[in-house]
Image: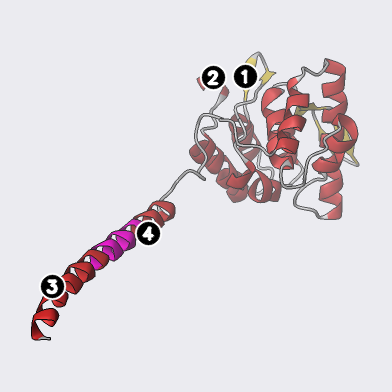
Amino acid sequence: MATKRAFVLPILTKEFLFMRTIFVLITLLVSFNSFARATDTSDSASCAVTGVAETNTGLSSILEIGTKLSDDKIKEVTLKLCSDVMVARREAHDIPKWESTMRSLLGYSGSKTDFPKYFNHFLNTYKNQIICPKYQVTTNIYPPQHLFKRILASGMNETYEEYFFNFENGDVDFNAYQIVDGKKETIIDWVDKWVASGRGDKDELLDVAYSLSDEFCAKRGSEL
């Protein structure tokens, strides 16, 4: 009996050591994966506007936008998007009802979750054509200006915080520009002028401009 026990114990010891080694390796692997996820910076915006993975529905809708729109159609959509900003301001909404506009005017048929990717693709594709027309509310006169500028000019600063600065929505190219006085003017240039004129909330506007420059690599017109 003693001989049998002496024979079995070494075998059990080897099995135990082997299983313990496997357990340690698995633990290390799980810990490494957890650390990798915790330190992953893939959700951060980058300078280059890159494509994003789409569901089938979202992808098909984006492909529809990929078919070049006419200038008249772009103006029609832009007019409504700019109007949505003013309505949101009046009704105290942080994010204008752009999804409804894109569904009605461009036939977006994707999900609510996929909409930001679709909308941002539209903004990037036609970035220099999305110019809001002149608009007057009582004594306030808004000159023709890019949608990005109209949002801030109307005091809708929260739209940047709640929509554009949400990295899950995908990147937006904020280097769209207008030709003003013969020069390229971007949203960064506009903020400089707006603040210098004493209009708007200086601190909030500068915070928005800093985030656009730091997180989205927005530039001044002279740098483009």
Task: Answer whether labels 1 and 2 touch (C-beta < 8 Å).
Answer: yes
- Which element carries disc 2, helix, strand or loop? loop
**Image disc number at residue 10:** 3
Mark linked to residue 112: none
Q: Quick one: SS at disc 1?
A: strand
Asked if the residues shown at circle 2 and circle 4 are in contact, with their CB atoms under 8 angstroms apart, the answer is no
Q: Which residue is mark 2?
A: 224
At x 28% / y 59%, what residue is drawn?
Answer: 25
Q: Are marks 2 and 3 in contact (CB under 8 Å)?
A: no
| Dot 1 amino acid type | Lys
- Whether tag 3 and tag 1 are in contact, CB under 8 A, the answer is no
Q: Look at discs 2 and 4 and give the one toward the viewer.
A: 4
Magenta range: 20-30
**Residue at the disc numbered 1:** 184
Q: CA distance from mark 2 to mark 3?
A: 74 Å
Is residue 26 found inside the magenta-colored segment of the image? yes
Mark 2 or mark 3: which comes first in sequence?
A: 3
> What's the distance in space between the residues labelled 3 and 4, CA to CA?
30 Å
Front tag of 3 and 1: 3
Label located before the other in sequence (1 or 4): 4
Mark 1 Cα shell of 10 Å, populated few (<14), some (14-19), many (≥20):
some
| Cβ atoms at labels 3 and 4 below 8 Å apart | no
Amino acid identity at mark 4: Val
Q: CA distance from mark 2 to mark 4?
A: 46 Å
Q: Residue at x 73, y 22 (%)?
A: 66
Asked where in the image residue 139 lies, by quadrant, the reply is top right
Residue farthest front in this picture: 1
The number of numbered badges drawn on the structure is 4
Dot 4: what SS? helix
- Asked which secondary structure carries label 3, the reply is helix
